[in-house]
Image (cartoon, grey):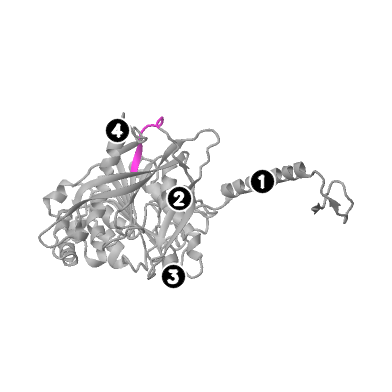
Amino acid sequence: MKIILNPCSVKPGIITPLRNKKPLLFLLIIILSAAINTSLAQDDEWRFINGDPLPDAPELAVRGEFKVGVRTITVVNKGQVDILNFKEGTEPTYDRNLKLEIWYPAFYSDGEKEFTSYEEERPVPKDPERKVIRYNFTGRASRDAAPDTKNGAFPLVIVSHGYVGSRLLLTYLTENLASKGYVVVAIDHMESTYGDAGGFQSTLLNRSRDILFVLNQIADLSKPGVNSFLAGLADASNTGLIGYSMGGYGVLNAAGAGYSPNLVNMFATMTGGSKAIEVLCTNNPAYKAMNDTRIKAAVAFAPWGMQLNIWDQEGLQGLKIPVFFVAGTLDDISGYEKGTRAIFEGAVNIDRYLLTYINARHNVAPNPPPQESLNHGLPFDFYYHYAEPAWDQRRINNINQHFVTAFLGLHLKNMEYRQYLDLPENSNTGKWTGFRPRTSVGLELLHSPAPRPE
C-alpha cells in the first residue's frame, strides 16, 4: 500500500492511504511542468548571450531595428589547385566545398522566437587521441526565418575566420550587423577549420580566392527572380569584408594588397616548388585583373603576415578602399609594431583607422570562451583560443560592435557616424563620443586620411 501526505485533507503530521489521487497527481505534474517551461523561457530571454550589450557597452553596440534570420548553405568552387597534394611537375586540382552561415534581416511569424542553437566542435589541442569536444551555444537569430525583402537590397558583408577557426567564431558581430540591415556571410574555409585543418599552405593560397568566389556566388544568388532566399535581399555591388588573423591576411589581399616576392619564396619552400601563389602577388597581371570594385570597405582584426614581410611597400600601396584595423599592443601571433601597425602605416593611399587594445594579445576578435572550455582536464590552449589575459572578451566584443557599426555604416550606408570615429587618439586623456563616462580607457584610435587628389 502506497501512502502520501495529502495537504488538502489531513491534519499536519498524519499520513493517510492513497485513494484515487491520480487525477490530482496528474494536475500537479502539469502545473509544475508549466512553471518549469516558463522559467526556462525567461532564462533564455534574460540570460547573457554572446553579443549582448553589457551595462558599459558603447552606444552603437546595441542591436538594430531588424529581426535576424540565419541559414546555412554550401557552395563549391570547382577545379582549384590542390596544393596539399602538389608534387614537383604536377599540379592536381580538386573542388573546394565552402559551408556558409548567412545572417539577414528577417520577418518573424507570430510567436517566432529570436533564438537559435549553433553547433560547434573542436579537437582537443595536442591530444594524442585526437579527442573532439562538441558543444552548442545560443544565438539571437531565428533559423530559416522569412527574409525581409520589402526594405530593398541590403549591403553585403563577408567574414573570414582565423587559422584554425570556423564560420561561427564571430557570431556576436555577425548577428549584430544583420540586425542593422546587412546580409552577413561567414565562410568555413576548407582545410582551415577546426574539423578539417590541413597544411598551412592551403590557407596561404586560398583565403582571398575563397572570399572573392563567395562574393560572386552571393551576387548570383541575390539576383531578382533567382530561386534562392537571397533573391533581391543582398546588394553585392556594395560589399564590405571582415577578416580575423588569417582572415585579415585574405581580406587585405582581396582588397588590393598584393603579396610580396618574399611570400612566393616561402610558399615554394613549404610546398616543394609550387609557384601557384604568384597570381596573388603585386605585379602579376592575373592579380591586377582580380581587382573588384564591388568591395567598398574592409575591417582587419589582427591581420597576419607583416611580421614575415608578406607585404612590402608596393603591395600595401595597392589598397584602394578604406580599412579599419584592430589590434592588441602585445599581439604575439601577428605582431603589433612590426605587424598590424606597420600595415596601417604602409597603406598610405587610403583612409584608414587603427583601434588598439592596450595590453591585449591576439584574440581581439572572437566570441568569448565557450562554457565547455572551462571543463576540468582540458589543455590551457583550448580556453586561450578565445580569451585575453587583460581584457573581458565580452567588453572587447561590445567595443568591436560599436566601431564596426560606425565604420561600415559610414562607408556602406552613408550614415552620419564620423563623430564616433573622429576621436582623440588616447582614450585615457580625451572624451570618446558614444562611450559612457569613465569607460573609455585602455584604448587608442589612430586615423590617417587618404591623400587629397592633386
Locate residue 405 relative to residue 339 in the image: left or right.
Answer: right
Q: Considering only order in the chain, which callout, 3 or 1, is on the residue closer to the N terminus?
A: 1
Query: Element at badge 4?
Result: loop
Residue found at the far right of this picture = 11
Q: Residues within 10 Å of mark 1 (few under 14, many from 20)?
A: few
CB under 8 Å between discs 1 and 4: no
Q: Considering only order in the chain, which callout, 2 or 3, is on the residue closer to the N terminus?
A: 2
Q: Name the dominant secondary structure of the magenta segment.
A: loop
Q: Considering only order in the chain, which callout, 2 or 4, is on the residue closer to the N terminus?
A: 2
Is 331 placed above or below 222 here? below
Find disc 3 in the rendering and name its residue.
Answer: 379
Q: Nearer the viewer, mark 1 or mark 3?
A: 1
Query: Element at badge 1?
Result: helix
In 3D space, how far apart are the residues under numbered discs 2 and 1 (Cα atoms)?
26 Å
Find disc 2 in the rendering and name its residue.
Answer: 118
Give the image location of residue 144, x and y in percent: 43, 39
In 3D space, how far apart are the residues under numbered discs 4 and 2 (Cα atoms)?
28 Å
Give the image location of residue 154, x and y in percent: 36, 37
Give the residues in magenta: 149-156
Residue found at the far left of this picture = 89
CB under 8 Å between discs 3 and 4: no
Q: Nearer the viewer, mark 2 or mark 1?
A: 1
Find disc 1 in the rendering and name its residue.
Answer: 33
Is 229 placed above or below 259 here? above
Residue 450 in sight here: no
